[in-house]
Amino acid sequence: MPAPGYQSYAWTTQDWRTVKLAKGGQAVDYAERCGTDSTLPSERKRLCLPREVIERLLQSAEGTRILIAQARKKQRAAPGTSVPWHPTIKALWRELEERTVKDRRDNPVESASAFKPHSLERGEDPTTRDNPPPTDAKERYTTSHWGIEPTKVYEADIPGEPDDAEMTEMGKLIELWVRPRKRDRADALKINFPVNAGCHLAFTPDDRERLYCVLPPKWRKIVRDRLIQPGYDWYTLSDIAAAAGGRQSGFDLPDRDAQVLGYLTNVVYATWKKGDDDDQEGCEYIHRMGEEGGMEPYLAVDGDGHLWICGGTYSVPDDGITH
């Protein structure tokens, strides 16, 4: 039987690690994720534990002793043998489990029937605004940043968009808050991006006003390795958007398959708009998706590590994301 949380949604958020003992058995290495280098040449298994549990044990001599003893027991056990955890390890894991988004044993879009398309009617059409915004990406940056002109142009790899397409940056992507699909689970998973990681939140300045998470290759690999779940179902982006509903589901998406992470509830980005502090360091803006009664989009991840905001009733006027 696999360890609690292994190969599960909670396992992803808890960052389970392989515990390796250095020669002599008195030093611990937990640099590799669980599943990597976790099988010994003898086919016996190494111990796997959440990173937080490992690091809390290593904070004391007694905890270190418990961790090393548990790792030795696991490595000496016959293949397939269940090795009970030490009570201290159990207590630390239970404490962590209480703070973790509950496990999704099925994909959050649980059946084909869940993909019944929702309404396309709700949500603002940008073309009907009293003063339609400019469709040029540079001009749109200036209006959406309240008079600040752009100073940089970034190259971005966006599947499905023409090579010469231009987008408008909203700011540096800081956090995405995701709620599992079941309504009775209120805890949000926060996906964090360092401010200097080169990750951006951008949108198309046309009538779609589609939001994109623009990630460099390094971060697409991190996203792919941490968020894609073995054994979970894959759906087309169009089907995921149709399940979310809203005006955004009425626009074409690339023919790519992805796994659903859950509802995107909040987007956090950092930028500098006219009227912010004069140091030009910028401010963090937090947008609640669906705050005005609209439909929240789904957040999905494809096999290349691209994050997709699928469906929803949001639009991106110059005041910021509305929903």
Image: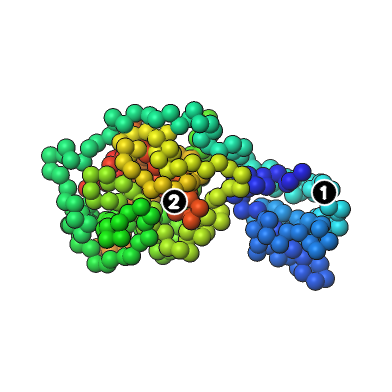
Percent across and percent down for residue 128 are 16, 37
Q: In percent of the image, x 61 and y 48: which residue is there?
A: 230
Look at the picture and state if 203 lies above or below 252. Answer: below
Q: Please give the label number shown on residue 137.
A: none
Q: In percent of the image, x 48 and y 50: which residue is there?
A: 302
Mark 1: amino acid: Gly
Q: How would you rate the neighbour count of disc 2 (Cα within 10 Å): few for under 14, some for 14-19, many for 20 or more?
A: many
Tell which residue pokes out farthest to the front in this image: 255
Percent across and percent down for residue 178 are 47, 43
User: Can I make out residue 231 in this image?
Assistant: yes
Q: Quick check: 46 left or right of 202?
A: right
Check disc 2 and report the residue beneath it.
307
Mark pair 1, 2: CA separation: 37 Å
Of the pair 195 and 120, the residue shown nearer to us: 120
Q: Quick check: 119 left or right of 228?
A: left
Percent across and percent down for residue 297 are 39, 39
Could you say which quadrant of the image residue 105 lies in?
A: top right
Check disc 1 and report the residue beneath it.
80
Q: How would you rate the neighbour count of disc 1 (Cα within 10 Å): few for under 14, some for 14-19, many for 20 or more?
A: few
Nearer the N terminus, badge 1 or badge 2? 1
